Structure formats: C-alpha cells, structure tokens
Amino acid sequence: MEKSQVKWLYISIGFSILVLIIILFLTINENTVRYLQQINPLFLLLAFMTHILTMCFWAMRVKKMSGSLGYPIGFFYSLNLVFANLLAAAITPAQAGGEPVRVHELYRANVPIGDATAIVIMERVLDGIALAALAAFAMIVLTDQWKSLGSISEIMVYITWIFVAGCLFLFYLAVKRPDTVKNIVNRVARFFTRKWESARVEKFVMRADKEIDNFNVAVIKFVKSAKGGLLWGMLFTLLYWVSEIITASFILVGLGQPPLILESFVIQLILAILMMLPLTPGSSGIAEAGAYSMYALFIPASIVGIFVVIWRIVLYYFNIALGILSSIIIVRREAHYKDKET
C-alpha cells in the first residue's frame, strides 16, 4: 500500500475504534457479563460464514457479467478481486476506492479497460436498483417495523425515499438525456468550486463528463448485447444484499438475543444506504453510531455495545483482513509478471 493509503487506513480504523470505545463506555454495566455468558459461538461463526457467502455472491456477479460480454473469468479470480476491493473500500468515502481496483483486476484478466469500466459501473447501478427495490418492499410491507424505530424512522423514511427517487431519476437522465446531466453537473461543480483555479475546475468538469459518457456506454453495451449478464447480475445483487442484511440476525442470536429479522432488515437497509453516502472513510463512525442508535431500541443496553463491536468486526475489520491477504496475492502476482518481462 502507498503511504497515503496507509494514512487513510489508520484514520478510518482509528475513527471506528474511537466510536466503538465510546459506545462500550456508555453500554457496559454489571449485566454485560451475564449476557456474555449466553454467547453461542456457533452462530457467531455462522455470521462470518454468511459474510463470506455474501462475497461469493459478489464474485459470481462479476463472473457472470464479465462472461456475458465474452470474457470468461474464474470464480476464485473473481473472489480475490472482490477481496482486493474491500481494502480500498474501507479507506474511501462511499467505498468508492474499490471501483478502480476492480477495473484493474478485470483488465489483468484480459478484459479491455472500456468493458471493465462498464462492468464496474453497472455493478453500482444494480446495487442502486436492488436497494431501491428492497427499500420499497420494506416501506410497503414492513410498516410496523419502520414505526417501531420511533421518531427516527420518519426522518429515515424521507431520507431513504429521497435517495431512492434521486438515484432512479439520475439513472433515467443519464441514459436518456446525458447532455442534461452534464449541464446539471457542470453548474453544480462550478457553484461549489468558485474559489478553485479555472484550469482545475475545467479538469474536474471534463472528468465528470467522461464518467457520464462511460456510464451511458456501459448501459447501452449491456442492454444491447448482454441482457443475460444483467439478469444474472441482478439476481446475485439481490442475494448479496439479503445475505449481508441477515448477517446481523445471526450475530444477535449468537449473543442470546432474538434474531429481530424484520426489524434488522429495516435497520440494515437504512445503514446500507447511509454507508453509500460519502461521509467518512469506510463509513467508519457513521456505521457504528447508526447501528447503536437503532438497535438500542430493541435489545438491552448491556449488550448492544458488544453487538455493534462484533457486527463491525464481521463486516468491516474482517473485510480489511481479507483485503490485505488479497493484496499480498496480487503483489506477488505482479512481481511474477515483472520477472517474466525481464
């Protein structure tokens, strides 16, 4: 890793640990030991295994979408690609750092840069559509669970609907009216970069225009020649999010608590959307505070802090460990390539 990446990794982990310490300080009491004696390691292990299964669904999505464009990629190569993505995602806001890693690894698997970019962009699109569908399901079917979150639920309902509607509207504009999106981005960029040098602003706007063009090309490519890849991609995207969401329920059962499947579905959906917003590196601090504030409404205060810690170990710190392991494999592979070239 580069020095700047190591710095951001330390910042992300440090912020996460700080928030976790505060949560533990506020929640640990004399009853915590009694709850800890009820831990079932089997279900905690199952939570880790479910998270690995989630990564396998992601790897299958990459494999199927690449194959639909005529580029066969092995499952284990795709899985290592996903693991490598996790480390970069953990140190960047909205987990945006994972995209370049996935593009690079697809390129190394003999997928042209343009098609690799199309695959990665469509993954993001499918994530947005899946979250929109799951949010609509939760809001229509799980009304009682939304209400059970108290006053915070009303705010989160509005935020979620705005997010979903905004994503769908931007998706429509980017496909049907890319010039309109470019014009909007241009105006917004110039408003927020008034103090920048003109050359820097122009460079930023040109980069944004290029990304919009890439998105448009990606959609056309899949719609015209790889509809099967989109269907497989959507299937594995839904499996990915459902698997990721129910991981929390296994942790709850492992701590001797009810699974809260429906409540947890709503909470994890809210957290997934919040963690896609570019707020902090790897959403550290945001995820911990959000999980604590919502799960504290359903499980005893004595154990909620322990739950949040284990939840972040499974979904964040475990990701970093997998990402480091994958990065070592990639570094060795790149060194082997250089040896062959020389």
Image (spheres, grey):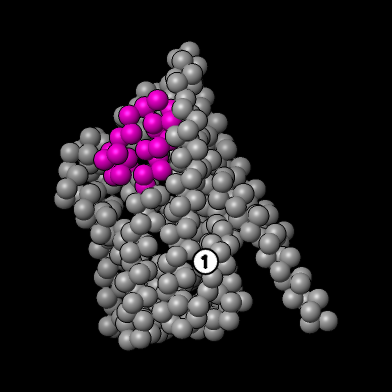
Residue 137 visible in the displayed image? yes
* Image coordinates for residue 183, horizontal then vertical, percent: 35, 81
Which residue type does callout 1 highlight? Phe
Q: What range of the chain is rendered magenta?
A: 245-267
Instruction: Determine the image quadrant of residue 68.
Output: bottom left
Name the main secondary structure of what is drawn in magenta.
helix
Q: For residue 252: magenta?
A: yes
- Name the residue that disc number 1 marks: 75
Q: Residue at x 47, y 70 (%)?
A: 63
List the single residue furthest toward the right.
Answer: 342
- Under tag 1, what secondary structure? helix
Residue 98 visible in the displayed image? no
Label 1 crowd (10 A; few <14 / some 14-19 / many >=20):
some
Is 82 drawn above or below residue 37 in the view shown?
below
* Image coordinates for residue 266, horizontal then vertical, percent: 29, 44
Q: Quadrant of the C terminus?
A: bottom right
Instruction: Determine the image quadrant of residue 297.
Output: top left
Is 263 drawn above or below residue 222 in the view shown?
above
Question: How many dots with numbers?
Answer: 1
* Image coordinates for residue 17, horizontal then vertical, percent: 57, 38
Q: Residue at x 76, y 70 (%)?
A: 335
Q: Residue at x 49, y 51 (%)?
A: 52
Instruction: Determine the image quadrant of residue 173.
Output: bottom left
* Image coordinates for residue 204, horizontal then vertical, percent: 51, 77
Is 290 drawn above or below residue 301 in the view shown?
below
